[in-house]
Amino acid sequence: MKRLKLIFLIVVCMGIASFFPNSVLALVDGPCSVCHTMHNSQGGESMEPGGGYEPFPSLTRGTCIGCHTGTNDGGDIPYVMSSGEPNYGTDTLAGGNFWWVATDGEGDDTKGHNVLGLSNQDTNIPAGTGAPGGWITCSNTCHMTLAAKQTVIPELGSGCEGCHLAPAHHSDDSDVVVGSNPANRGGWFRYCSGHMSGSGHGVEGIEDTDWQYTNSMSDHNEYLGHEANLAANAGFYNLDNTMSAYCCGCHGGFHDEVNGGGAWIRHPSDAVIPNSGEYLNYTVYDPLTPVARPSLDGWTAPISDVRPGTDLVMCLSCHRAHGSPYPDMLRWDYNSQVAGGGGEDTGCFKCHSLKN
């Protein structure tokens, strides 16, 4: 009888576990107290880093910025804002760092996304005009600025949550290609998802386990790409679940790249790297100049090859998502890219190899 009861108990527990798959495979593990507090007080002291007793959603001990400010050392928390100037490329991650645009850092509006709680609104963008290349101009929304509290859909959040719409830290991201399995799309790739007309869509990709704190030709994120009509605004509706589609939510006008005569008027994105001429020389993946892949189906890990004629140039091939030491959030110093200068084959010269 005891044996039958034990078997019954095991079966019941297995059945209960099957109803809660995310509790079995959670993105975040470790002591709950690291991130959460019940009353924000212990021994008469605030549990909020830096003090204070401001309440935060989900009983967290701080804001996105509060939890993700620090110096990267390869640990379990990715830091996107530093208390002092970070060493670019050494203790910065794939998305870069807000220090160069933040008011507590260099404070240069050209060097990153201006985000609520980190920086003021960009002085280079006239009020009410929205993001450069913007085509969705709803007032008081994140499409206009990330540096102000948006009031149209308050439940979506503001600032960091204007981009990371669903920061589901306990979502199951066990799939190699995060976001590719409809059952596990709680977080998408780095919590980059759509809303309203883009609802049900988000970014798919392979997430580097240390956010590219260490990186090499075979140690990096992998991004999904999609060759598309380059004569129109764009988004999830025509670019699939790609990073460029996500960027186009605010900068979709930059996807209109050709005129009536077919000449380039902007650098192409979501365009296949030509399988000819100088482009043939970019064959070994450089994390400083990432490319997108037309499909990640069946992928089990990042690869070290770049495949002209197959892989694509995308928004993040040239820009950092958070910030960089260079104007326009570029990955390298554009002003030092001198044609015929004989310098290193970085930046523009990775693809335009014969221009160096």
Image (tube, grey):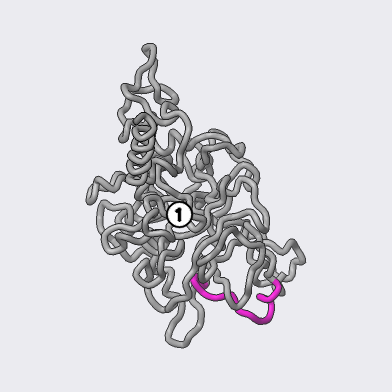
Query: Which residue lies at the image location 34% right of the left edge and 33% below the top edge?
Result: 5
| Place of residue 263 in the rendered image (x, y in percent of width and height, measured from the top left) | 50, 83
For the N terminus, the quadrant is top left
Query: Is 325 above or below relative to 68?
Result: below
Q: Nearer the viewer, residue 354 or 315?
A: 315
Residue 120 seen by the camera: no
Q: Nearer the viewer, residue 11 or 41?
A: 11
State whether residue 153 appears in this view: yes
Residue drawn at the location 61% of the way across and 37% of the way down: 73
Looking at the picture, how far across and down is residue 104, in whole percent?
48, 36
Where in the figure is residue 266, as x and y percent of width and height? 49, 73
Specify whether residue 103 is painted magenta.
no
Q: Which residues are magenta?
A: 268-281
98 relative to 284, above or below: above
Label 1 Cα crowd, 10 Å radius (few <14 / some 14-19 / many 20+): many
Q: Which residue is mark 1?
A: 189
